Amino acid sequence: MKLKRLFTAVILGAALTAGYIYMNDVKPVKTGVPSAEVFEPDGFTGNINVISFSSPYCAACKKQKQELETLQSELSGEAVFKMVDVTKDRQTPGYYGVSSVPTILITYKGMEVGRFSGLQKAESLESEIKKQIEKHRYCEDGSIC
């Protein structure tokens, strides 16, 4: 009976230790700033920015890129578009908490106002981007621009 309790205690202790190590070693990457290669100072000149996180090995990302290129040509004067290759830049996805591709973020002056994960239709993206553009279309004095 004592041997059974000892064995149970050893197994339980090993499981708890393994769980502790796992929980403390697997932490999300959280960096202070996005990658400088992607976000150069003149990169975001507009208020509304659309950031697309993708991988060249992802079929859904390739389809999403086509959808975004169409939107970029339509909304070029109203929103700034950036593409982030997560295989080359790991700092920026960590900063924004992106864990899957394709992911699209809509930001207003650097703050996230919309997020889409997975393949999205151009219509739904366009609707949300236009909604954010209209929502934040105010001049510094509060009047509508």
Image (cartoon, rainbow, N blue to C red):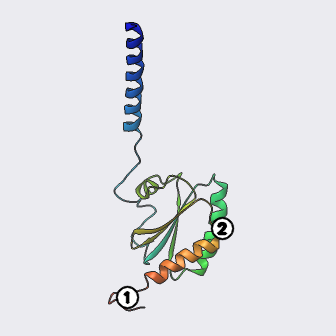
Left or right, 123 with respect to 134, comes to right
Question: Residue 103: which quarter of the image?
Answer: bottom right
Residue 94, image x, y percentages: 43, 53
Image quadrant in which you'd find residue 72: bottom right
Circle nearer the viewer, 2 or 1 = 1
Give coordinates of residue 86: x percent, y percent.
52, 54
Q: Is residue 43 visible in the rendered structure shown here?
A: no
Q: Is residue 133 above or below residue 13?
A: below
Q: Nearer the viewer, residue 87 or 106?
A: 106
**Quarter that holds the N terminus:** top left
What kind of residue is marked 1? Cys
Q: Which residue is mark 2?
A: 66
- First-in-chain label (2 vs 1): 2
Q: Nearer the viewer, residue 61 or 2?
A: 2
Q: What amino acid is labelled 2 in the image?
A: Gln
The residue positioned 62% from the left and 65% from the top of the image is: 120
